[in-house]
Amino acid sequence: MKREVTITVNGVAHTRAVEPRLLLVHFLRDELGLTGTNVGCDSSQCGACTVHLDGQAVKSCTVLAVQADGSEVTTIEGLANGALHPLQQAFWEKHGLQCGFCTPGMIMASADLLKRIPNPTEEDIRHGLEGNLCRCTGYQNIVAAVQAAAEKLRN
Amino acid sequence: MAKVIGQAIKRKEDPRLITGEAKYLDDIQLPNMAHVAILRSPYAHARIKGIDTSKAAALPGVIGVFTGKDFMDLNPMPCAWQAGGVKNNVNTPRVLEPEKVTFTGAGVACVVAESRYIAEDALALIEVDWEPLPVVVDAKKATEPGAPQIHENAPNNIVMEWECGDAAAVEKAFAEAEVVIKQPLVNQRLIPTPMETRGCAAMYLPYTDEYTVWITSQAPHVHRLLMTAFVFGIPETKMRVISPQVGGGFGAKIFLYPEYPLVAALAKKIGRPVKWQETRAENYRATTHGRDHITELEVAARKDGTVTALRVHTYANLGGTLSTIAPGIPTTLYGRLLSGAYHIPHIYCKVWGVYTNTGMVDAYRGAGRPEATYVAERAMDLVAQATGLDPAEVRRRNFIRPEEFPYAPADNILAGLKYDSGNYEAALNRALELAGYADFRKQQAEARKQGRLLGVGLSSYIEICGVAPSAWIGLPGQGWGAGLWESANVRVHLTGKVVVTTGSQNHGQGHETTVAQVVAEELGVSVDDVIVQHSDTLGTPFGYGTYGSRSAAVGTIAVYNSLQRIKEKARKLAAHLLEAAEEDIVYEDGKLFVKGSPDKAKTIQEIAAAAAIGYSLPKGMEPFLDDTAYYDPPNCTFPFGTHVCMVEVDGETGEVKILKYVAVDDVGNVINPMIVDGQIHGGIVQGVGQALTEGAVYDENGQLLTGTLTEYAIPKADLVPTIVQDRTVTPTPVNPLGIKGAGEAGTIASTPAVVNAVVDALSHLGVKHIDMPLTPQRVWAAMQRN
C-alpha cells in the first residue's frame, strides 16, 4: 500500500514510505517534525499551512505527499538563512502577528506574493493574501509588514 | 532613563512565532503517544439506544473504543456562573453523552489508535442506534407552548429569567414620552474561530495517580480546578495543567469542555500518553459560539432627542447544554451595560436564557457587552431618525458629562458599581474631526442626487474591563460566588535578571512584553532582563487567566503591587549596605543611593545579589527579592470611545463597501501603544465581520449549515481598509497605573458603527433597520421593501 517518495525539504532530501492519502502537511509535521507549518482548517480556506512547492506557494493540506515526490519544498523553518528573512523581520517590527498561528503561512504566502509583485500596492497585498486568514490582527499590520519587507527586498 | 511604559517596544515573544519554533498543542509529541478521535452526534436531538463498537475495535491499529458508559464515574462538567437564579435546571455535558444528545456535534464515542488517520477510519465503523427526537433551534420559539422539551428539569426550555432596573419607573416614562420607538433586533450567533482549534494531550503516572494535561487554554489554573474538584473529584495537586503556545482564543478557550477530562481519563485507561486535536469541522459544532440574542428594544425619548427610558426584552440562546459561564454572559455582562455612554433616567431589562438544540453559547470577545452596545447604539440612531436630529447631536445630548463621574447608571442596573472616569464628547469630537464628518454629510447629499448611496455610522461605546471586583462578581445569585482576582510572583535573581509569573495567560496579547515593560519601568532594569512565565500550574500561584480585558487592568496590577514590595525591601537592604536610614534612600533608574550621594549608588542588580547571597542582611530580613501578590480590583474599568464608519452601498447589488473607518479609543494609560493599536485593529475587524459577513445558521433540524470556513465567512484581508486611529487618554483612578484595558473595545465598537452606516445610507428610502449580517442579499431586500 505504501509508496516511497523523496521530497527535498529546506534543502535536505528525505525518503519515506508513505500512504498515498498522506497530506503533505502531515508529511512535514509528523514524518519530519517540522511543526512550524500549522493546520487551521479542513477545507483549504485558512492558509495556515502555506509552504513553497517548487518555488510556488501552496496550501500543504491540499497536496498529497505523493504529489510532491521529487519536488523541493520550503517551509517557515527554511526561510531564514542564518538571519531572519526580511519578511520575518518586518512582521516582528510592524507587529504583524498576535497569536502567531497564521503567521508561518502568512509569511510564506507573502514571500510568494513579493516574488510575483515586488512593488505591491496596498490593494495588491490585501487581494494577494485573501487565501490566508488571520483572526487577531485585522490584517492592518500584516499589510504594513509586507510593504516594509517589499521595500527592503527591493533595495 | 526614558520611560519604558508607553513605548512601542517590539514583542519579546515574536522570534519563536515568526520562525515556526513555537510549540502549539498539536506540535506536542510524547513518547509512545496514541491519538484520539471523537464520534459526534449527527442529530440535534436524539436518544442513544445502543452503540456497537466491535467493528471499530477490530481495525488494526485501534487501541480502544469507548462510549459514555465507560465514564460514568466522572461527573458532568460544572456550570460555574449560575447567574440569574439558575437553580435545579442545570444541564451540562458529560465527557461522552451516554443516553441523549441535545445538539449536533455532541461527543458520544471515541477511538484511541496508533495514528489520527486510523482513529478517524475507525470512527466510521462505529454503529449507533439513534432515536431522533423533535428539534427546536430558535430561542423564542423554544419557550412557546408545544415546543419540544429538551431537558426534563427545564420547563419551557428556560434556563433562567433575569431582570435588572425598574419596570414601574420605565412604564411611567413611556406613558409620558413624546417619542416612542419599538424595534426588534437580532444579534446573530457567531463562531469565535481562533485560527488554532482546541486540543488536549495527557499523560498519567499510575503509581502516584498523577495527571499532566496540556490544554489549549486561556485559564490553565481554572481548567485544573474545574477538572479536579468537579469532574474527577481528586485534589488539584494530582493534576498539572500546561497551556502551551495558544493560537488565539477570543473566549472560546476559557471553558471546561468534555474533551479535556476525556483525554486525561483515556491516558489512564490505556496507560499511554494520548492527544486529541480538534478539526475545524468539530470546532464549529462542539466549541462554544457567541451572541445569539433575539431582542425587543423600546426607547422613550423627548422630541429634543433626550432619551428618557429604555426597555429591553431579550431571549438569549444558550444551546443544548450549558457551558462553563454561559448564564453570566447575557445577564451580568449584558443588562448591566445597557446605559452605555448615556445618562438614561430609567432602564429595565429582562432576559430569558433558553435551551435549544444548538451548540453551546458562552463568552465570545466582548461577551455580553457587544450585545448591550449594539442595543444602545442602535437606540441612539433610531432616536436620531425619529426626531430628525443628527446622530452625533443625539449622542451629545445624552452623554454622561465628565463632571458626573464616578457615575452610577439608573435604577442600580450596574448593581453597585460606578463608571470610573470618562470624557465621551472629547472622543466623539476627535473622531468626527478625523472622519471629516461634516464634509461627508455634504458628499452624501450630493451623492444621493446622483443616485449613489453613501452612509456614515457612529458608535460611542463604553465597555466594562478588568473583571472583576469580588464584591460585584461574587454576588450570590448573580456572580460566580468567587472573586476574580489575579496573582503575580516577582523574583529578582542573583544575576539581577527578573522572573515574573502571572496568572494571566498570553495567547496573542503580548503579556511577555507588556509585563516586562512594567517591571523595567518600576525596577529600572532592561526589558531584555525580564522573563515573563505563565500558563503552567506547576509552581505558579493560582490565577484566573485571560479574558474580559483583565490582564493589563487586573493581572499587571498584581505584578505592580509585587514590584512595590520588592522595591521596599531593596530600599531596606540598600540602607543597610550603605549604612544609612531607609527614609534617606533614593531609588532611581535602577540605582539606590543616599539622598545627595548618587556617586555611591548600589545597582538593583547588586542589591539582588546581596539579597540572594544572603550573607549580610539586616536583622530579621529573609534572603532573596521575591514577592507574591494577589490583587482584587476595587472596581471594574470603563474604556470608551467613538468609532465612525463610512460606507457606500451598491444600489444594484446591495453590496456594502467600507470607504473609511475611524477609531478614537480611550483605554486609559497605555503600556505599549503598538500592542494596543493591534488589539483595536483586530477587534474592529472581528466586529465588522459580525456586521457584514458572519453568522452561524442552523436549519430547522438543527444541522449547522455554516459548518466549515467555506460557509462561515470570517473577514479576509480586503474587507476593511486601513483604519484611521487616535486615542484620548483618561486614566482610570481604579488602579495605580491608570490602565483600563483594550482587548475587546474594537469588537464592541465596530459592529453598531457599520450597521448604523448602512442604515444611514438607506435612510432616505425609509429603511430603519436591517438585521445582521448585512449581506448584499439582505441589504438589497431591505431596499426593495421600502
Image: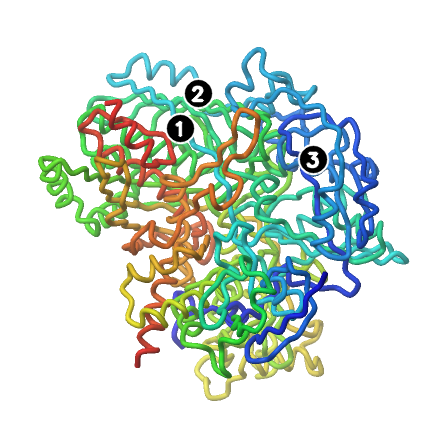
User: Which residue is the site of mark 3?
Assistant: B93
Q: Is mark 1 on a helix, strand or loop?
A: helix
Chain letter of mark 3 equals B
Q: What residue type is labelled 3?
A: Pro
* Proximity of marks 1 and 2: CB atoms separated by less than 8 Å: yes
Q: Are marks 3 and 2 on the same chain?
A: yes
Instruction: Farthest residue to the right: give it.
Output: B207
Mark pair 3, 2: CA separation: 36 Å
User: Which residue is the site of mark 1?
Assistant: B410
* Proximity of marks 1 and 3: CB atoms separated by less than 8 Å: no
Instruction: Name the residue: 79% across, 48% down.
Output: B265
What mark, if any, has residue B166 been given in the picture? 2
Q: State the image coordinates of residue B647 (x, y, percent, origin top left).
A: 24, 43
B641 displayed left or right of B559 = left
Q: Mark 1 vs mark 2: which is more N-terminal? A: 2
- Residue B536, compared with residue B644, is above or below; it is below
- Residue B48, compared with residue B517, is above or below; it is above
B290 displayed left or right of B70 = left
